[in-house]
Image: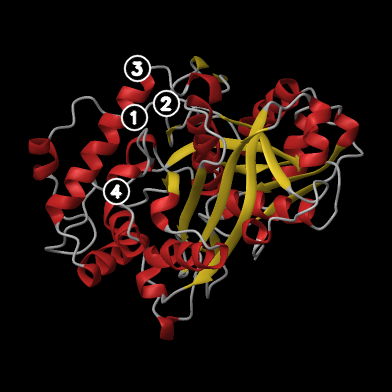
Amino acid sequence: MVRGLRRAGSVPADRQPVIIAALRTPICRAHGTLKTLQAHELLAPVLRSLLSVVDVPTELVADVVVGNAVGGGGNVARLAALEAGLPVSVPGLTVDRQCGSGLDAIVLASRLVASGGGGVYLAGGVESISTAPLRARPGPDGEPDFFGRAQFAPLRHGDPDMGEAAENVAASCGIPRQRQDDFALRSHRRALEAAAAGAFDGERVPLAGPAGPVGSDDGPRRSLTPAVLARFPAAFVPGGTVTAGNSCFDADGAAAVVITSMARAGEFGARDGLLVLGTDTAGVDPVLLGMGAAAAAQRLLADSGVASGELGLVEFNEAFASQTLACLDELGIDPERANLDGGALALGHAYGASGAVLVTRLLAQARRNPADGTLALAMISIAGGMGTAALFEYRSLR
């Protein structure tokens, strides 16, 4: 954990991490318009565009740090870096903390800057659920024994599937069905309004899909209404409150940022950015894995001396409405203040990319209404009972 940066107020400029650019692909439903693109093919255009936006000489890139959750192994960060045209001298590191991978990759790059690593880092996440390999282990007879997901916690701790865990949170925290449906509908409507206003235009990198160019997110549903949401049956637990309507859908996509020190940001003509004030990752009961983000954010805010009411921008990965509402309640954050342009309930959850999408959204929102000193929080809950949170401050650099 990076502790006390804001409270100390004396971080040297050559060790103060700052995010000076952030871009993402369109986020599209898995097995849809991006279904033929592999993970490195999703990420490489984002990396190329970032280097163009900030005009960073490629030889100054110290490392490419990328989160990925369900890929085929290997090192997608290195593969994507070479695909993007970076020189062979630039290494790559792939991080797997499941849904938190993209945010944790950014956290790791920030720590490298804070430790005096120097240079420029490209960090983010990518997921191609459409092209993820099938998983199998050898069966008793030597034939493949296919399985849907990895084990995240010992069975004695409980290792529920994500939907079942969302039901556990709903029951434990008293989040009723109606509140979940209302929040899901709000997410879709906000995303539609943001898209119509062009709020996503400057952060998206178009891709060449199998049926032609892809420039827009395809998740937000204009046809969704309270009546439609009310018709969805419980999806994971009989008689439960979590449905397909108030849960996210699987998606393909990538997002990445440029991280460097305050001292070097000016060399690339950066006009503004998000200073990384602190980060934290926490563990919680795996049965209530959706509460991980709240545990991490609570500790981070307390350590940084920041009250939740001081936050100007909040982005939370909306894997399920139940856990999003429960975490915001726990932190004392009015849900109306979070995810101003909608979230994963409308845009989709591209696992390893989602944490990086949160940071991309925060920078775009801060630039829309620039005010020095705006505090911004990104947080995401993670399989196995964990959560990662990162605290930023928007700052003009000129």
Amino acid type indicated by mark 2: Asp
- In primary-sequence order, the first of circles 3 and 4 is 3
- Determine the secondary structure under disc 1: helix
- Determine the secondary structure under disc 3: helix
Does the residue at mark 2 contact the one at mark 3 (Cβ under 8 Å)?
no
- Which residue does the numbered mark 1 point to in the structure image? 191
- Which residue does the numbered mark 2 point to in the structure image? 217
- In primary-sequence order, the first of circles 3 and 1 is 1
- In primary-sequence order, the first of circles 1 and 2 is 1
Q: Is residue 255 visible?
A: yes
User: Which one is in front in this view, the residue at disc 4 or the one at disc 1?
Assistant: 4
- In primary-sequence order, the first of circles 2 and 3 is 3
Amino acid type indicated by mark 4: Pro
Q: Quadrant of the C terminus?
A: top right
The residue furthest top is 212
- Callout 3: few (<14), some (14-19), or many (20+) C-alpha neighbours within 10 Å? few
Amino acid type indicated by mark 3: Ala
- Which residue does the numbered mark 4 point to in the structure image? 335
Percent of width and height locating residue 136: 54, 61
Amino acid type indicated by mark 1: Ala
Q: Quadrant of the N terminus?
A: bottom right
- Determine the secondary structure under disc 4: helix
Percent of width and height locating residue 105: 65, 51
Whole-number angstrom distance, CA of label 3 to CA of label 4: 22 Å
User: Which one is in front in this view, the residue at disc 1 or the one at disc 2?
Assistant: 1
- In primary-sequence order, the first of circles 4 and 1 is 1
From the viewer's perspective, tell me whether residue 149 is left or right of residue 281: left
